[in-house]
Image: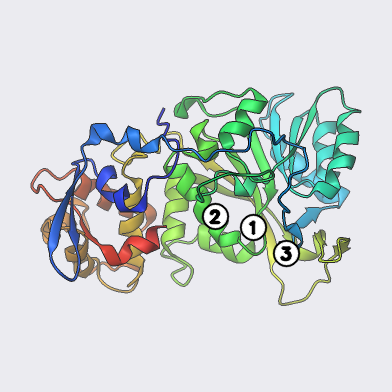
Amino acid sequence: MWVPGARMPSRLTLSAFTRAGRFCVLNSVAARWKDVPAENCRGLYDFHPQLESDVGFVKSSSRLYKFRSEPKRYVTSPRLAETMVRMLRGKRKAGQLILECNPGPGVLTRALLESGARVVALESDKSFIPELKSLRDSVNGRLEVIYCDFFKLDPRSHGTLTPPVMTSDMLFQYLGMKAHPWKKGFPLKVVGILPIKTERNTLWKILHDLYSCSSVYKYGRAELNLFVSEKECRKLTANPQTPGLYQSLSVLGQIACGIKVLCTEPSSSFDMYTIKGQLERQRHRESEQNLCFIQLTPHRNLFSGTLTPFNYDVFFHMLRQCFMKRNAKLIDHLPSLSPIDAVHILKQIKKHKDVRIIDMYPEDFQRLFETIECSKDDTCKWLYDEFMEDTLA
């Protein structure tokens, strides 16, 4: 299993991830070569943020966590909780572990426990912790309560971390869970609702973590079951038949995961923790979006070909650069991506010279990446404009 531990410095990322170890970098002054031996890549993953040694999982911290500025939705409807449990059950074996993100008042938590699941409640709001701990004491060890924000695991900022922000290593070591080989899966499911204000950024972080086999995915192919806005769901599942929604996020999500929309609920089905510190039912407005409950199951064979956790950033770069001019022809894009002859690449991927970026399906982009990455004709396979560096962060 690929086990990179932390994100590499942005200045080293692309040069280290290329399989050939050589990357042609273009800027306004001149082209230059970067060279990082492949055998040295692992050493760049040794950095891990350090947590304060005296901070426990549910212990109060000296640093104030400002959850009031980050409103969250909560499942408070028994009907919705039962629907979610039914969809999560599937082929789940009795006693399977469920990682529940921000359970709040614990309505879904109780439904999961009643179904026979073992639950780890990761709650980022300390006001809900006492009630969850009370529930824990009544279910004979089938519930663990941890003061933790799942969506802020393994932040990129360096330095001391204070719960509810922590590293996945600390979380899984506490739970006694070890890394599983990628192809064997991972014996847990994650369920939650994406943060309202940072929904899109959170989706990007999930994809970065997945492709790099870092954070939760360092431990295996964790299945995520998340409520997301209908808008982001439609973008994530878009293809050339829905060109107005199709983007690099669509391609990356579909290449990495099997994406299944389990159900759709109006936003009025959820309660929100307001700035006053009270749970309030949202008033439904026609302009408000529905929320889609989606299942993201990482593909077992994601890393069985050319794509690896060591060159995924090149794939990200290729897609983002392509979609910057989404209606342009692919043949016009290729000279800015690679010095390899554009006509030759088109023949290899069996595409006509008039094909546009917006006409290519996710598997076409994967084939394009593999064709360039596996080319033996050129020492320099990729062209990298430093202007794009910030877009990869």
Q: Earlier in the sequence, mark 2 or mark 3?
A: 3
Please tell me the numbered disc located at residue 228. Answer: 1
Kindly identify the residue that appears in the image at 69 percent across and 69 percent down. Answer: 289
Left-right relation of 330 to 107: left
**Residue 290 vertical placement versus 172 (above, below):** below
Q: Residues within 10 Å of mark 2 (few under 14, many from 20)?
A: some
Which numbered disc flags the more N-terminal residue, 2 or 1?
A: 2
- Amino acid type for the residue under numbered disc 3: Ser
Q: Residue at x 41, y 64 (%)?
A: 240
Q: Is 391 placed left or right of 189 in the picture?
A: left
Q: How is the image coloured?
A: rainbow
Residue drawn at 9 percent across, 49 percent down: 378
Q: Position of residue 92 (x, y in %)?
A: 68, 29
Q: Secondary structure at mark 3?
A: helix
The amino acid pointed to by label 2 is Leu
Of pointers 3 and 1, the one earlier in the residue sequence:
3
Mark 2, residue position: 203
User: Quick check: marks 2 and 1 in contact, CB under 8 Å?
Assistant: yes
CA distance for labels 3 and 1: 19 Å
Is 102 in front, or is 221? 102
Residue at x 42% of width, y 48% of height: 255
Residue occupied by mark 3: 69
Can you say which quadrant of the picture contains the N terminus? Answer: top left
What's the distance in space between the residues labelled 2 and 1, CA to CA?
9 Å
